[in-house]
């Protein structure tokens, strides 16, 4: 895992700190509430949203169930189209491969499109150690990089900064990185965007190497797909001679036609748009158009461990839309940084402990950073049952931590959530699920269904977590499985 | 590390990842031929009635909603419309892909037309005001034009670096209602750019601002013959 995130405080400690930051909380509240309302409108245009959601989940589950087959198909297709495929077991492996590829070009500068996978592996730091400078080109990532900060939201990484703070960062820092900000820079978003355009254009025009992630990889054709808004993605994917894409193995879908589902659900869930301004798709290399050298680095880094958990593997369906962050009362109060990884909010609470394991205080505390209100599940465009996985991970941690130092972190996280009545009250308002209606067993599975429904559904906490906590016998752990007979309130 | 060591290390990463996957999905049904059950696709093929006029109106509406300039004209008026947009923009130079139909350019006055021969650099294009392209198709429900580097669209860089993009869509033949209908008509082996409105960002307090790195002005010309009236 990235050194960037090593040594971070556990969730409750970091959350307690960010909760005290009034500015941060105001920025976050404004942003998440705005996007929430817009998203609901965008989704109401599609009367078949539940069907699209179910199909998205089914396509992802199907791909994951045959991941080896589809990865080999992808590898063959990318190679046939002139690309080179590399496999990386972990972050070190991936960083070594990318640094080697950049060095082979003789370049010491690369431009980057926002990519969570490269944040996850700490690529920028690894490249810096090899004397290679990586320039982030997404406006928000630029703000974060110039401000020597860390991203706090999947979609809007600088969501915790307001326009005045951004103006100050640009005025102070741009000159040290390249073209300075204009002297009379105002804090209107249009002026700030113009300053970024000018600052970055000189970098795009001279860049020889770009590094990207991808939203989707198509097994059948070897095609990669990147969705974006600003055009920095197009610049990076089109102008340089060498393109290196670092992509998690779970980003795969079987066919080109399958995009019909995700191109409908992702932009609406993410930016609340019918469609994002730009989507680029490419297959290997094309003579006379775009990079002449294309490398795809397929990243495991804990994904196969996640895949091995028949309940937790649902997290690998995630298309990183960030809808679950925007509805999460805990995220709204704690902010993205408290989650200690590039994946904040509900998805971070289930993904990070699975990718990294739960041996650190931070990672063990993450599954407790939730009130289990279920709002995240309701908005998730691939129907990941996040509360279910949280409960499951709590069980895992409870078993692992008995008489262990982790217990403290876990207790603190649970207490932090419970100590924030307004976060909790909000959770109750947003809760739309009637959890007591959930069956604990699915109808007898057919062979085709057996894989995804391989186990009984876990028992949901019958009482709310909070009631249970209050009523628990002294010494009982914050275990996610209280008696199920109790009624939900 | 020698080159041979590196190669074998790479080989072992590949085998390791595949091995872990196979161990992890051991509970998947064995021997199944991967194919997703088509019955799972219960979503709709389109959300719009099958009426070309309705579909075209929706395309115009959605393009405009995301701040593209929308201009409707007949085939006879296309050249004049392109010329007018360049003049209004005050474009000194416009680049065109090699396969752009020449009659489209017939009315241009006062703008230098640069035909891309495949050697124009990004630096050179940075000094060009406008680009004129056709498209592969347009999607009404999302307000999207799709460029697939066809002869009337050219290299991806052409529609990226100049700050003003004029894109010509022929209706009804290039217009589909929905994404499920768009994908089968596109060849994923070609490099593609899907464009829905001009470049934008919402990174500052989620305020949408038009124009960061791509063309800040997108003009879409919808060309259709007038309905034959009885
Ligand atoms: S878990 Fe679902 S809602 Fe959250 S980011 Fe992933 S896909 Fe979006």
Image (spheres, coloured by chain):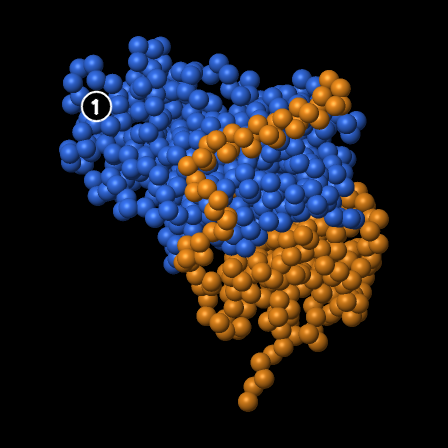
Please give left or right for residue A143 compared with residue A128 in the image.
left
Colour chain B is painted in: orange
Q: Nearer the viewer, residue A239 or A205?
A: A239
| Residue B24 drawn at (x, y percent) | 46, 32
Residue found 61% across the figure and 53% down from its top: B194
Q: Which of A219 and A283 is in front in this view?
A: A219
| Residue A162 drawn at (x, y percent) | 49, 32
Disc 1: which residue: A469
Question: Which of the image's four quarters has the C terminus of chain B?
Answer: bottom right
| SS at badge 1 | helix
| Residue A5 drawn at (x, y percent) | 51, 19
Residue found 61% across the figure and 30% down from its top: B14
Q: Chain ID for label 1?
A: A
Residue found 34% across the figure and 21% down from its top: A397
* Residue A131 seen in this snapshot: no
Name the residue furthest bottom.
B230
Colour chain A is painted in: blue
Question: Which of the image's four quarters has the N terminus of chain B?
Answer: top right
| Residue A93 drawn at (x, y percent) | 62, 24
Please give left or right for residue B74 compared with residue A260 in the image.
right
Q: How many marks?
A: 1
């Amino acid at each position: 895992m990235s050194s960037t995130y090593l040594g971070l405080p556990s969730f409750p400690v970091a959350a307690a700190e960010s909760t005290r930051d009034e500015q941060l909380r105001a920025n976050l509240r404004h942003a998440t509430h705005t996007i929430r309302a817009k998203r609901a409108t965008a989704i109401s245009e599609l009367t078949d949203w539940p069907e699209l959601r179910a199909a998205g989940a089914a396509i992802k589950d199907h791909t994951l169930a045959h991941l080896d087959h589809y990865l080999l198909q992808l590898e063959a297709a990318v190679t046939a189209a002139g690309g080179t495929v590399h496999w990386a077991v972990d972050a070190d492996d991936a960083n070594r491969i990318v640094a080697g590829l950049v060095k082979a070009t003789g370049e010491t500068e690369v431009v980057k499109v926002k990519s969570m996978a490269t944040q996850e592996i700490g690529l920028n730091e690894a490249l810096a150690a090899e004397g290679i400078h990586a320039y982030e080109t997404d406006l928000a990532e630029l703000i974060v990089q110039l401000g020597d900060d860390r991203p706090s939201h999947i979609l809007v990484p600088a969501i915790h900064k307001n326009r005045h703070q951004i103006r100050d960062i640009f005025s102070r820092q741009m000159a040290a990185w390249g073209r300075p900000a204009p002297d009379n820079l105002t804090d209107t978003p249009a002026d700030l965007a113009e300053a970024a355009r000018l600052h970055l254009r000189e970098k795009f025009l001279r860049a020889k190497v770009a590094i990207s992630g991808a939203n989707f990889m198509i097994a059948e054709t070897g095609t990669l797909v990147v969705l974006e808004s600003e055009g920095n993605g197009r610049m990076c994917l089109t102008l340089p001679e060498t393109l290196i894409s670092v992509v998690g193995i779970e980003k795969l879908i079987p066919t080109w036609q399958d995009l019909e589902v995700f191109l409908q659900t992702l932009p609406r869930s993410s930016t609340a748009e019918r469609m994002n301004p730009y989507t680029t798709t490419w297959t290997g290399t094309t003579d006379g158009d775009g990079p002449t050298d294309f490398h795809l680095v397929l990243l495991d880094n804990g994904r196969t461990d996640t895949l091995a958990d028949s309940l937790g593997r649902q997290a690998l369906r995630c298309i990183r839309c960030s809808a679950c962050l925007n509805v999460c009362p805990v995220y709204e109060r704690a902010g993205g940084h408290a989650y200690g990884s590039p994946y904040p909010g509900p998805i971070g609470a289930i993904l990070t402990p699975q990718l990294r394991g739960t041996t650190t205080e931070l990672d063990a505390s993450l599954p407790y950073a939730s009130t289990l209100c279920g709002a995240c599940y309701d908005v998730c465009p691939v129907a990941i049952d996040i509360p279910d996985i949280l409960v499951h991970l709590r069980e895992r941690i409870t078993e692992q931590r008995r008489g262990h130092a982790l217990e403290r972190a876990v207790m603190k996280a649970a207490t932090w959530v419970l100590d924030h009545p307004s976060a909790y009250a909000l959770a109750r308002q947003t809760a739309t699920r009637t959890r007591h209606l959930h069956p604990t067993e699915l109808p007898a599975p057919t062979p085709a269904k057996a894989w995804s429904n391989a186990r009984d559904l876990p028992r949901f906490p019958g009482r709310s977590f909070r009631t249970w906590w209050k009523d628990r016998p002294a010494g009982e752990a914050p275990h996610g499985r209280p008696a199920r007979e109790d009624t939900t309130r | 590390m020698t080159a041979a060591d590196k190669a074998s290390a790479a080989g072992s990463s590949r085998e390791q990842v595949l091995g872990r996957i196979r161990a992890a999905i051991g509970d998947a049904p064995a021997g199944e031929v991967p194919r997703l059950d088509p019955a799972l696709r219960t979503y709709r093929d389109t959300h719009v009635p099958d009426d070309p006029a309705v579909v075209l109106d929706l395309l115009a509406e959605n393009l405009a909603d995301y701040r593209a300039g929308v201009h409707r004209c007949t085939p006879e008026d296309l050249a004049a419309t392109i010329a007018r947009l360049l003049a209004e923009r005050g474009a000194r130079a416009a680049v065109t892909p090699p396969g752009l139909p020449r009659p489209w350019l017939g009315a241009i006055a006062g703008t230098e037309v640069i035909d891309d021969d495949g050697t124009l650099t990004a630096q050179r294009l940075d000094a060009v005001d406008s680009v004129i392209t056709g498209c592969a198709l347009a999607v009404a429900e999302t307000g999207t034009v799709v460029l697939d580097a066809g002869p009337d669209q050219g290299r991806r860089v052409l529609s990226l670096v100049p700050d003003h993009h004029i894109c010509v869509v022929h209706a009804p033949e290039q217009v589909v209602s929905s994404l499920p209908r768009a994908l089968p008509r596109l060849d994923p082996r070609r490099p593609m750019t899907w464009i829905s409105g001009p470049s934008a960002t919402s990174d500052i307090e989620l305020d949408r601002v038009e124009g960061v790195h791509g063309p800040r002005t997108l003009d879409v010309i919808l060309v259709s013959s007038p309905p034959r009236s009885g």
